[in-house]
Amino acid sequence: MTDSLYEVDFYTWTEQQADLLRQGNFEALDRTHLLEEIEDLGNRHYDQLESRLVLLTAHLLKWQVQHWQRSNSWRATIRVQRLSLDKLLRRNPGLKSRTEEAMAEGWEEARLLAIAETGLPDDQFPDGCPYTFDQVIDPDFWP
């Protein structure tokens, strides 16, 4: 019954699991799916970290490579992403140990996004990320 409820009505399943936890009825919990959902929740925060770094890095690349097109919009995106990253890491300090990993995993996506948005040839952009995490979040860093 629990498995089928998880599959057909996720919301009701979550309410049921919360009630079981409140009651201390641990034996009745759907532990398999509950563990998957807790891990997925953590992964969502990591995905948000990577996504914000992709957007921020892409805009820093555009700022550096296509300097004649710099705009207030690019500046605003860079500033907003830096603030959002700061907030995400303050609320989830455990993510700090994964920032370099997120930078590395998101690099190619950031590069491709910058290439697509500028229309410049691929060879105008570095093959490897030229920035460190500390640089991309530094409000005074403008390549």
Image (tube, rainbow, N blue to C red):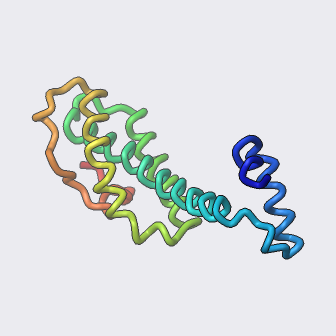
Q: Position of residue 39 (x, y in %)?
A: 56, 62
Which residue is most to the top? Answer: 119
Of 113 and 73, nearer the camera is: 113
Q: Position of residue 117 (x, y in %)?
A: 31, 27
Q: Report how many numbered discs are placed on residues in the image.
A: 0
* Residue 27 shows in this picture: yes
Residue pictured at 24% horizontal, 49% vertical: 143
Depicted 127 relative to depicted 30: above or below = above
In the drawing, does residue 4 fall left or right of residue 73? right
In the drawing, does residue 19 fall left or right of residue 79? right
Of 52 and 142, nearer the camera is: 52
Dividing the picture into quadrants, the one containing residue 71 is: top left
In the drawing, does residue 116 fall left or right of residue 74? left
In the drawing, does residue 119 fall left or right of residue 103? left
Residue pictured at 68% horizontal, 66% vertical: 31
Q: Position of residue 87 (x, y in %)?
A: 55, 59
Residue pictured at 19% horizontal, 53% vertical: 130
Of 107 and 88, nearer the camera is: 107
Which residue is most to the left? Answer: 123
Residue pictured at 65% horizontal, 59% vertical: 33
* Residue 87 shows in this picture: no
Of 116 and 26, nearer the camera is: 26
Q: Position of residue 97 (x, y in %)?
A: 40, 71
Dividing the picture into quadrants, the one containing residue 66 is: top left
Which residue is most to the front? Answer: 1
Depicted 82 relative to depicted 99: above or below = above
